[in-house]
Image (cartoon, rainbow, N blue to C red):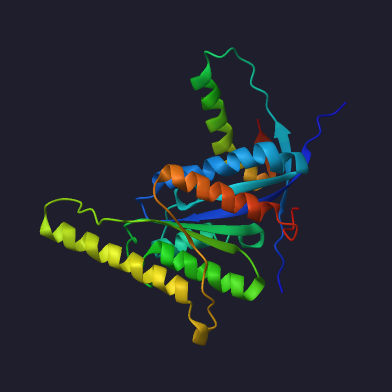
Amino acid sequence: MARLSPQKVDAYHVFIASPDDMGQERQEIHSFFEQYNRTMANRWGSASLW
Amino acid sequence: MPLKPRSVAEYHVFLASPGDMNQERQEVRQFFEEYNRHTASPRGVRFVVIDWENYATTGVGRPQQLITSQTLAQYRDSLALVIGLMGQRFGSPTGTHEAGSEEEFEWALDSYLRTGFPEIKWFFRTVKQFVAPSADTKEIQAALEQWTKVQNFKKRLQQGNPPQGQPPLFYKEFTDTGHFREVLQQDLSLWLAAPERPWS
């Protein structure tokens, strides 16, 4: 019987430095990496976390 | 000193629902985003929510077949969970099934019966009063047909299909998005933390 097997990915981390009036721009960075992970990084077995 | 990535074990969660459950779909994504940050990530585990909007591409073929092959089938080895959500709508016919969510449920159940995964969790929004979409009688009739299909599907999950080897499914109901958040949180927190899970 097949077993549930996680995909092994290399995770790199990105830190966002900003004062608290940059909420929208911080969200843009989250959105960028979310999409990048989904479309590009995922295919190479890597992911960017923040 | 070279930059070194961390090794992460990535499991996948598929979201199945018709188009009237966007808020609840967002709740599922937020739950896993927080769970990854606070609980899974320190243990080297991550859950990725996959859905047709973000993971399926257009092309030649039956649309639901393309969606299934690019989501459920693509991630079948690491697909830990399928979450189904339904309210008053059932969805549109796919060519082989009454709705995409139904076809996705069949795929998941078939895989579960053969391999033991993915786990399947289904949540229904309680419809205390049928809400007509407009005053147009055709639209009312179409909405009523959709709601009838949801009720039939719910009955089917309750009863299963023992002659076909299909077990019943224990589902949960919720009243609104806030209640769904609570129900989801309680259910998934217990399930994810159970010692028999491979990531525990």
- Is A1 on the left-hand or right-hand side of B140? right
In the image, what residue occupies the spot 54% across and 40% down? B30
In the rendered image, residue B13, in percent from the top left (x then y), is placed at 58, 53
In the image, what residue occupies the spot 23% across and 63% down? B144
The extreme left residue here reads B136
In the rendered image, residue B58, in percent from the top left (x then y), is placed at 42, 53
- Is B184 on the left-hand or right-hand side of B86? right
**B1 vs B22, nearest the viewer:** B22
The image quadrant where one finds the N terminus of chain A is bottom right
The extreme bottom residue here reads B163
In the image, what residue occupies the spot 53% across and 50% down? B184
User: Dividing the picture into quarters, in which one does residue B75 lie?
Assistant: bottom right
Is residue A10 in view from this perspective? yes
- Is B20 on the left-hand or right-hand side of B5? left
Is residue B98 in view from this perspective? no
| Residue B94 vertical placement versus B181 (above, below) | below
| Residue B98 vertical placement versus A11 (above, below) | below
**B107 vs B70, nearest the viewer:** B107
In the rendered image, residue A50, in percent from the top left (x then y), is placed at 65, 30
The number of numbered discs placed on residues in the rendered structure image is 0
In the rendered image, residue B112, in percent from the top left (x then y), is placed at 60, 70
| Residue A21 vertical placement versus B140 (above, below) | above
In the image, what residue occupies the spot 48% across and 81% down? B161
